[in-house]
Amino acid sequence: TTFNILPLFLFLLQVGFFPSECVELINDKVPQSVTNSVPKPVSKKHGKLITFLRTFMKSRPTKQKLKQRGILKERVFGCDLGEHLLNSGHDVPQVLKSCTEFIEKHGIVDGIYRLSGIASNIQKLRHEFDSEQIPDLTKDIYIQDIHCVGSLCKLYFRELPNPLLTYQLYEKFSDAVSAATDEERLVKIHDVIQQLPPPHYR
């Protein structure tokens, strides 16, 4: 038999477990025949169910406890930069720190950020960083495919929900690069960079 959730949901609405705005919206859509067919629960059961639900909601573990137990992993890719740095306690994302150090040491080759690496290597690296591990970039697989590390950096920036230079400052950056002379352009770009939020600025 399938468990019908509608009677429980209607009961929760009836005892005021959900906000009144929700009740009004849902009541308009629930047919009268359905609401009439739901049996009225006994008051003792009301109390037990409400107590159970309240206990369940209050006893949920915190995000920090879930992280300590290894149940919850912090996302690295596709996560807001400020939120990621706050959760990880870093000044700069570890993925960028590791990749740029590796590129500075081994990546002095043509087209390091222009050419793409092998897709499977990029995904392997991404998975390791998303699993809160710091991969060993000195393995032969990465040394022989240095471009996968550059590609991973580009992927990180591409997936930021709010770009590094931020949507909010887009118009100001656009105006700055349109300045008439090189000197004026540098001054304007410098001024806009100073307005970036601290995580983006760093």
Image (cartoon, grey):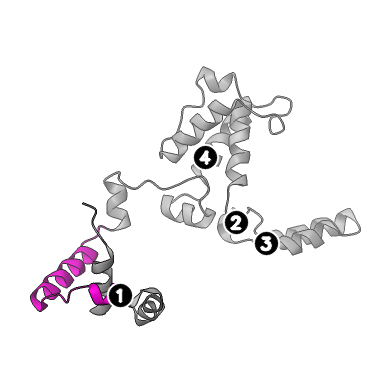
In the rendered image, which quarter is residue 133 located in? Answer: top left
7 inside magenta stretch: no
Of the two numbered discs 2 and 4 on the same chain, state the one appearing first in sequence: 4
Cβ–Cβ under 8 Å for marks 2 and 3: no
Of the two numbered discs 2 and 3 on the same chain, state the one appearing first in sequence: 2
Alpha-carbon distance for marks 2 and 3? 17 Å
Q: Which residues are magenta?
A: 34-61
Q: Secondary structure at mark 3?
A: loop
Q: Secondary structure at mark 1?
A: helix
Residue on which disc 1 sits: 33
Residue on which disc 4 sits: 95
- Residue 18 location in percent, x, y? 31, 75
Amino acid type for the residue under numbered disc 4? Val
Crowding near the residue tagged with mark 1, few <14, some 14–19, many ≥20 C-alpha atoms within 10 Å: few
Is residue 155 something one can see in this rendering?
yes
Of labels 3 and 4, the one closer to you: 4
Of the two numbered discs 1 and 2 on the same chain, state the one appearing first in sequence: 1
Q: Residue at x 11, y 72 (%)?
A: 45
Residue on which disc 3 sits: 194
- Residue 35 location in percent, x, y? 28, 75
Of the two numbered discs 1 and 4 on the same chain, state the one appearing first in sequence: 1
Amino acid type for the residue under numbered disc 3? Gln
